Image (cartoon, rainbow, N blue to C red):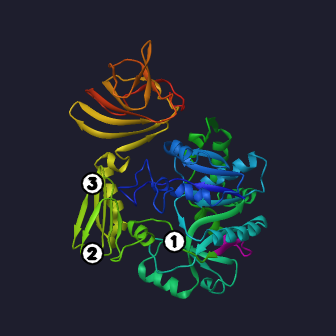
Amino acid sequence: MLPVILCGGSGSRLWPLSRTQYPKQFISLADSFSLLQNTVSRFRAADSIYVICNQDHRFLVAEQLRGNQSKVEILLEPCGRNTAPAIALAALSALKNGKPDEVLLVLPSDHHVDNIPLFQEKVAEAEVLARQGSIVAFGVVPRSAETGYGYIKVKGAPANACDKSAFEIAKFVEKPELSLAEEYVSSGQYLWNSGIYACRADRYLELLKEFCPDIYSSCLAAFEDASSDMDFIRIAEEPFAECPDISIDYAIMEPLCNQTDSSAVVIPLDLEWSDLGSWSALWDLKEKDHNANVVEGDVLLSNTRNSMILSQDRLIAAVGVDGLVIVDIPDALLVADKDQVQNVKGIVDQLKSANRDEYIKHREVYRPWGKYDLIGQGEGFQVKQITVNAGAKLSLQKHEHRAEHWVVVKGEATIQRGDQQYVISKNESTYIPLGEIHSLSNLQDEELVMIEVQSGDYLGEDDIVRFEDLYGRA
């Protein structure tokens, strides 16, 4: 089978830890690995893996999957158009690679699954059905009445009996009100919609062409006009932008369910699963102390219960707290009632309306060559800690509005400044005047760490003119 990992996301539901440029799939939440890395690790035996993401996340994906034993093909969507078009791109790529009957296993990149052997057993069952022409959904047997999930209603015997390997699907249901969710769970005929699917590439395109010919034609044109960029496949922007924004549920599964001889089926998953779509969901997952608190970082508690308290770099002291989520990171602090965390998105919407950066990026920002941390700023200046990976190089560039002072605190920097090339080591510094063409390289086997002081009348990240770049950004 060919795992197809959908790696989109707006980064709003786990704000402030998750941001638009660093959504939750890239964060280590369940253990020391990111959710994306854990998703890929479930399919170590796969020859190839497709990852579909947007261009802003391409270097994060490449970095996190570096060294993966499977061949990773990264398809870059020029804009988000939901799951139906994304899966079409993967199916078209399978056809191009001479494998029209390849079974695609479509998975979100940011879900938690605890019983991997059972999950893989169900995947094997789905492969058999998919090869016969079925479109297979995976539905999780509900543990409770949840309003944050969509539901799948099955035909026939109750799905929670799990005495059958697969059921025909009656219909898909959007996220319900609590009273309706309780009815669904008590009936035994509804499963949580996991967003995981299995289907043959050629079968998916056949159905897409039948039910949504406009999506099929847009995706075909966008894929045929795609270009290669380093290790990435760039989907053509103009035809893809014309594609409707629609999920596989609406585009394929629902019209397929309405056919007399439907090939839309669902396999129940009776295991612990979560889409980690809120802070309360993360609290459910995490190990707790004797007062049902989840605590990470430098935290002191007194008479505190049922709470989640995360600190990244300073002491948090909580006294007499019950049922709160407190998340403190360098540039933002969230305090929320654990029963109200679904409304965190409202704060993100306010940040967007105010044109603030805190919903887009962290103070620490990742780049293909390493990362930088904005550690201080004031009128006319800002200070960054720059970390350059071993063997990496920044672009040959210049700035129109700022000068830069660099001090090496670890490693050795190779500098090109105008016609000069020289090396500076720990405790040495250099100066890059405004308008000077320059570049920075780390030719050593260890990371390079520098303190950069920028000064000028404009300090935005867009004040950069690139002349040469290893990462295709010139």
Circle nearer the N terminus (1, 2): 1
Q: Which residue is disc 2 drawn over?
A: 322
Magenta-drawn segment: 256-267
Amino acid type for the residue under numbered disc 2: Asp
Amino acid type for the residue under numbered disc 3: Arg
Q: Which residue is disc 3 drawn over?
A: 314
Residue 430 in the image: state x and y as whole percent.
Answer: 34, 21
The circle on residue 343 is none
Q: Quadrant of residue 193?
A: bottom right
Q: Is residue 26 visible?
A: yes
Q: Secondary structure at mark 3?
A: loop
Q: Is residue 266 magenta?
A: yes
Asked whether, in this view, residue 290 is left or right of residue 74, the answer is: left
Residue visible at 28% across and 48% down in the picture: 354
Asked whether, in this view, residue 210 is left or right of residue 424, the answer is: right
* Residue sitting farthest toward the front: 426
Asked whether, in this view, residue 111 is left or right of residue 122, the answer is: left
Q: Nearer the viewer, mark 2 or mark 3?
A: 3
Q: Is residue 84 visible?
A: no
Separation (CA) of disc 1 from disc 3: 38 Å
Residue visible at 64% across and 36% down in the picture: 228
Q: Which residue is disc 1 drawn over?
A: 150
Observer-nearest of 441 and 270:
441
Near mark 2 (Cα within 10 A), the count class, few <14, some 14-19 or many ≥20, is: some
Circle nearer the N terminus (2, 3): 3
